[in-house]
Image: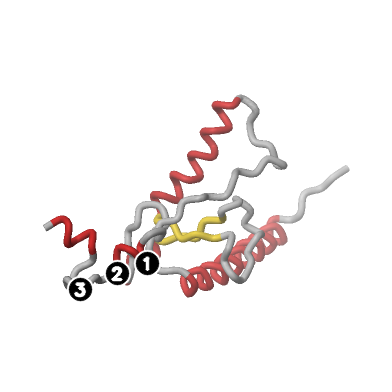
């Protein structure tokens, strides 16, 4: 017959698991904040000061244990875009009718928020980037 652990032991175990999870999350979050600009990779919002807490680390392959130190599996997303990313994944499971499959992983994001930024920032003598010079 299987007996459940006493409430005190269960509470200790849960507290230890929560503490370990928070330490793990804190360490890769701090690394990601050092590696990447404090900008949401989806919507482009820049977050700083007190609002920096709204910037989350998203695992591109949806595997929270995959935390390479160079950050290739991470992207910084604001709370709203992060929620949207996970909802998009969940909703896709309902439409295909198969439900979640632990072996099936979504394709990594191909969105590159800073692609072409260097061209926009190049100054060709007019004191303003080309994109701004053309507007007015």
Q: Is residue 93 left or right of residue 81?
A: right
Q: Quadrant of the N terminus?
A: top right
Side (left or right) of 10 relative to 53: right
Q: Which mark is residue 52?
A: 1
N-terminal label among 2 and 1: 1
State the separation of the CA atoms marked 2 and 1: 28 Å
Residue linked to disc 2: 122
- For the C terminus, the quadrant is bottom left
Q: Which mark is residue 125?
A: 3
Q: Is residue 75 above or below residue 122?
A: above
Name which of mark 3 and mark 1 comes first in the sequence. Answer: 1
**In the image, residue 119 lies at what x, y percent?**
33, 64
Numbered mark located on residue 103 in the image? none
Query: Quick check: marks 2 and 3 in contact, CB under 8 Å?
Result: no
Residue placed at 35% from the left, 63% from the top? 117
Q: Is residue 86 above or below residue 64?
A: above
């Amino acid at each position: 017959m299987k007996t459940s652990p006493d409430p005190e032991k269960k509470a200790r175990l849960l507290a230890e698991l929560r503490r370990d999870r928070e330490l793990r999350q804190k360490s890769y979050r701090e690394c990601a904040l050092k590696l990447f600009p404090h900008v949401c990779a989806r919507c482009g919002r820049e977050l700083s000061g007190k609002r920096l807490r709204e910037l989350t680390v998203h695992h591109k392959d949806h595997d929270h244990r995959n935390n390479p130190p160079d950050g290739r599996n991470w992207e910084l997303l604001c709370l709203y875009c992060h929620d949207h990313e996970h909802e998009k994944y969940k909703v896709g499971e309902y439409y295909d009718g198969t439900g979640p499959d632990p072996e099936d992983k979504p394709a990594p994001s191909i969105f590159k928020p800073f692609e072409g930024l260097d061209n926009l920032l190049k100054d060709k003598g007019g004191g303003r980037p080309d994109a701004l010079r053309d507007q007015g």
